[in-house]
Image (cartoon, rainbow, N blue to C red):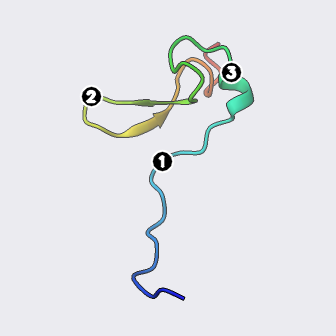
Amino acid sequence: MPSGADRAPSTVPRADLARAADCEVCRGWGTVVTDDGRHELCPACQTGGR
């Protein structure tokens, strides 16, 4: 069994892929990358903007 550093918690938010399926903004991923490189939930399909 390999040993090493513990995995850091992911900073990528969990998206509902069923809601993202037909979204043209995120193209089905459920997240978008901001101008400063952060992953955020898609404002069109994940936060009720649809």
Q: Is residue 20 above or below residue 9?
A: above
N-term mark: 1 or 3: 1
Q: Position of residue 44 (x, y in %)?
A: 56, 17
Residue drawn at point x = 48 percent, y = 58 percent: 10
Tell me: 14 left or right of 11.
Answer: right
N-term mark: 2 or 1: 1
Disc sitting over residue 22 in the figure: none
Which mark's residue is nearer the viewer, 2 or 3? 3
Which mark's residue is nearer the viewer, 1 or 3? 3
Location of mark 1 (residue): 12
Location of mark 3 (residue): 21
Which residue appears farthest toward the front when viewing the image? 1
Residue drawn at point x = 48 percent, y = 47 percent: 12
Residue drawn at point x = 41 percent, y = 39 percent: 39
Q: Looking at the rendering, in which quadrant would you find the N terminus? A: bottom right
Residue drawn at point x = 45 percent, y = 79 percent: 6
- Residue 36: which quarter of the image? top left
Residue type, numbered disc 1: Val
Residue type, numbered disc 2: Asp
Location of mark 2 (residue): 35
Residue type, numbered disc 3: Ala
| Secondary structure beneath label 3 | loop
Q: Are marks 2 and 3 in contact (CB under 8 Å)?
A: no
Q: Is residue 32 above or below residue 27?
A: below
